[in-house]
Image: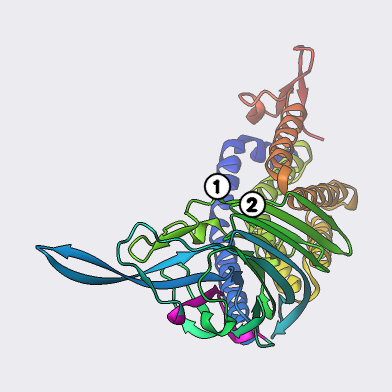
Amino acid sequence: MRDQLHALQGSVTGKVLFIAALTLLLLIPLGMIRGLIEERTALYDTAREDIANSWGQPQTIGAPVLVVPFEYTRWFDGEPKTYSDELYALPEQLDVIGTVDAEERRRGIYRVPVYTTRLRITGRFPAVALDEYPDLKVLWEQAQIALPLTDARSVTEPIVLASGNGTTTFEASGGRVAGFGPQLAAPYAALGLGALTAPQAFSFELALGGTGALHFLPLGDETRVAITSDWASPSFVGAFLPTDRTVDASGFTAEWRVLDLGRGYPSSWKRSETPQAVATSAFGAELITPVGIHEATTRAAKYAVLIIGLTFVAYFLCELFAPLRLHPLQYLLIGMANCVFYLLLLALAEHIGFGPAYVASAVAATALITSYSGAVLASLRRAAPIGGLLTALYGYLYVTLKAEDYALLFGALGVFTVLAAFMYLTRHIDWFTVSSGTRRGGDGGAPVQLHA
């Protein structure tokens, strides 16, 4: 037994190099697992897109844009020439109030959040003035009202705009106003308003479905949006955050108030003056899960080398302080068992959720390694610290993954703590003389025998 211990101690440097090399070698199966995670993520994205194509894409909703064509005359060398152009005018005031009813739709094993929203949109058209053109003729009978809307296929009711004593109905039109993406259009003449010499109120209701996200464009000189939803995990995104919001287990409410000063484009422009910052001014909410299963599994896999390395260090210490010698194959099996944890986590998480899958995978991996350690270390008493270490590591990793804002801090503190513990446990070892079977005592006195 003493000869075996001396042989081990005489090859401490070789053992350390072997452990380092094996840890790097295990990056290969870990890389394959991370590739599998990416593949499953792509499948989830495909399922999400399939549902969005059927239910409705993530929606971005604008406001009625008044499209007013006009003609004017310019004189050249005494000869008149008539030109045509269009004026695009945004509402003076825009108010959006509505509800967002969310649910989950499945495609195979994947679940995707979708919603149905009903909005009441009110506001005021501005007065239209084009006094800078000579011989101006405004073609009010050809004027239109454009409504930016990402995916009109999911509209469940006709969209009827009321203003004055008349109404007009929106229909598909493609891109009536450049820079605003897909739009609907309605004839302005149906309202019977004639020339807009003063602001005119309008209102309409919009009912439609969408997948994942609901965004709004701040097209009013003052835009106010207030929505209520039963989804408990929103993410408020875009160019503007809510001025007031409430999020709890029953859902969320959010209100935005946006002025035209910060949106990056004017309240009116001509056809040749297409605004460029419309899409970037959108704001709204995304319906998310706090940590997606594939994102969480990817983040967990980033800590795999740390967990594998610490498990190897624990076995190395057992070899160093006990009359044992472990075969390289045993190290490899332990490392592979740690790798399988991440494969189990991914497979189970897609069916039962990340939390239960993590617990089940951690228990399975810890039980497997601990029971195997009891055999190779020839003592359950020696295997118990291994099981305790893995339990602590997997528990700490779970807390780190859940603490999204503090994940880096927790991870750094964990690495520091483990390094400090290893330095403390090996602080009295004289690595230069360990090959002789002795180590220095803590008081710097006579060498202390390492053998049992």
Residue 177 at x, y = what percent? 44, 71
Bounds of the magenta span? Answer: 141-155
Asked if the residue at tag 1 contacts the one at tag 2, i.e. Cβ–Cβ closer than 8 Å, the answer is yes
Q: Is residue 282 magenta?
A: no
Kindly identify the amino acid type of the residue bearing the numbered disc 2: Val
In the picture, which quadrant includes the N terminus?
top right
Circle 2 residues within 10 Å: few <14, some 14–19, many ≥20: many
Residue 31 at x, y = what percent? 55, 61
Viewer-closest of 95 and 113: 95
Q: CA distance from mark 2 to mark 1?
A: 8 Å
Label 2 residue SS: strand
Residue 282 at x, y = what percent? 57, 60
Viewer-closest of 51 and 401: 51
Q: Which mark is residue 199?
A: none
Viewer-closest of 125 and 15: 125
Question: In the rendered image of this protein, does residue 437 appear above or below residue 243?
Answer: above
Image quadrant of residue 56?
Answer: bottom right
Label 1 residue SS: helix
Q: Tell me which residue sits at (80%, 67%) in the image.
A: 229
In the picture, which quadrant includes the C terminus?
top right
Q: Is residue 397 visible?
A: yes
Query: Dot 1 corresponds to which residue?
Result: 262
Q: Is residue 149 magenta?
A: yes
Question: In the rendered image of this protein, does residue 362 appear above or below residue 148?
Answer: above
Residue most extreme to the left: 77
Circle 1 residues within 10 Å: few <14, some 14–19, many ≥20: few
Kindly identify the amino acid type of the residue bearing the numbered disc 1: Gly
Q: Is residue 290 visible?
A: no
Viewer-closest of 204 and 246: 204
Query: Dot 2 corresponds to which residue?
Result: 258
